[in-house]
Amino acid sequence: MKLMKLIGVLAVSAVLLSGCAGAPTALQQGGYPAWYLNPGQVFPDSRYLTAVGTGVDRAQAEQQALAGLSQIFEAQVTVDMVMQERYADIVSASGRYSEEELELTQTTQVSSVQNLLNVQFGEAAVDSRGMIHIIGYIEREQTGRVYADLIERNSNQVRSLLREADFSRDPVDRFAYLSAASVVAQGNDMLVNQLRIISPAQAGRLHLGYDLVQILQLRSQQAEKLRVEIVLEEDHDNRVAGMIGQAFGREGFSVSSEQPLLRVTGNVDVSESSVTGNFET
């Protein structure tokens, strides 16, 4: 059974969950529901994360509720978007994850464009002004179990990559394994931070079996050993080579022509381009 059916994964732009798309309940004079006036009374904080949204229609009200839930995470979880893309690529290419787990990997990103896991919506209500109110909620225990399962799978992969790095004789291969391990471990760290918000108890029971800081140090140390030589013909003043060298430097590589392990070669061809308006070459 697909994960979408099992846990109702919803992105910000997702359609409503089935069964929740009925017409909003009309409010009597001054009769706002308890979940609007005091969400914690209906959805106890010990079991749920909640946010109430208001809009001119149901879609806008849901967007507001999702935004409120997102803010709970934004204050405490930061995401490196490049790392997150690499993490998703590695997990997808590993061949060790089920279709459901790959879907989950794609929906756990917390960033300025929020995608949250297992968001559900309660009943909607319309007031005398025609404004729609709705509550969005995440069930802590159920959602926490899904996170914990994926974190465990990621941890297994990180440990496997580290073993491959230990056994590797080739310095480039060793770097590749350490680099992959660091990316998956950082993606897992994001999930752990989210789980601490969703279910602190389940987060406290996690056993990763590795140290993220140590993995990053090992990757950095291995990158320093991979000297890169950059040889470009027709590169006047080494301008292009300098930019390429900076890119390698940001990844921790050393740019040197002394016994290089990697070599970048090429030819720089500069041609005039036609411009219009007030621009000049």
Image: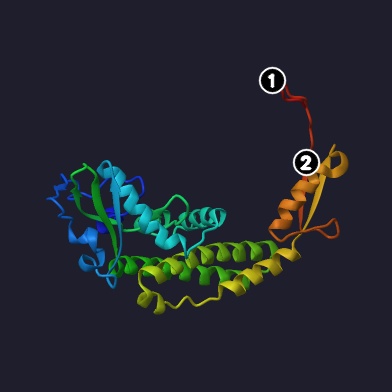
| Residue 132 locus on image (x, y percent) | 23, 46
Which of the image's four quarters has the N terminus?
A: bottom left
Q: How many marks?
A: 2
Q: Residue at x 42, y 77 (%)?
A: 206
Q: Amino acid at mark 2?
A: Gly
**Element carrying mark 2:** strand
Q: Nearer the viewer, residue 84 or 196?
A: 196
Look at 45% across and 68% down and name the residue there.
Answer: 193
The amino acid type found where label 1 is placed reads: Gly
Q: Position of residue 144 (x, y in %)?
A: 34, 68
Q: Which mark is residue 122?
A: none
Give the residue at mark 1: 277
Identity of the residue furthest to the left in this view: 28
Q: How is the image coloured?
A: rainbow
Q: Is residue 249 above or below residue 151?
A: above
- Tell me the quadrant of the picture where the C terminus can be found: top right
Residue at point 36%, 56% (across, down) = 68
Is residue 204 placed above or below 137 in the rendered structure? below
Q: Quadrant of residue 5?
A: bottom left
Nearest-to-viewer mark from 2 and 1: 1
Please, what secondary structure does the residue beneath circle 1 have? loop
Labelled pair 2, 1 in contact (Cβ < 8 Å): no
Query: Which residue is tagged 2?
Result: 266
Q: Earlier in the sequence, mark 2 or mark 1?
A: 2
Please indicate whether residue 11 sits to the left or right of residue 155 in the image: left
Residue closest to the eye, 241 or 34: 34
**Residue 46 as seen in the image, left or right of residue 176:** left
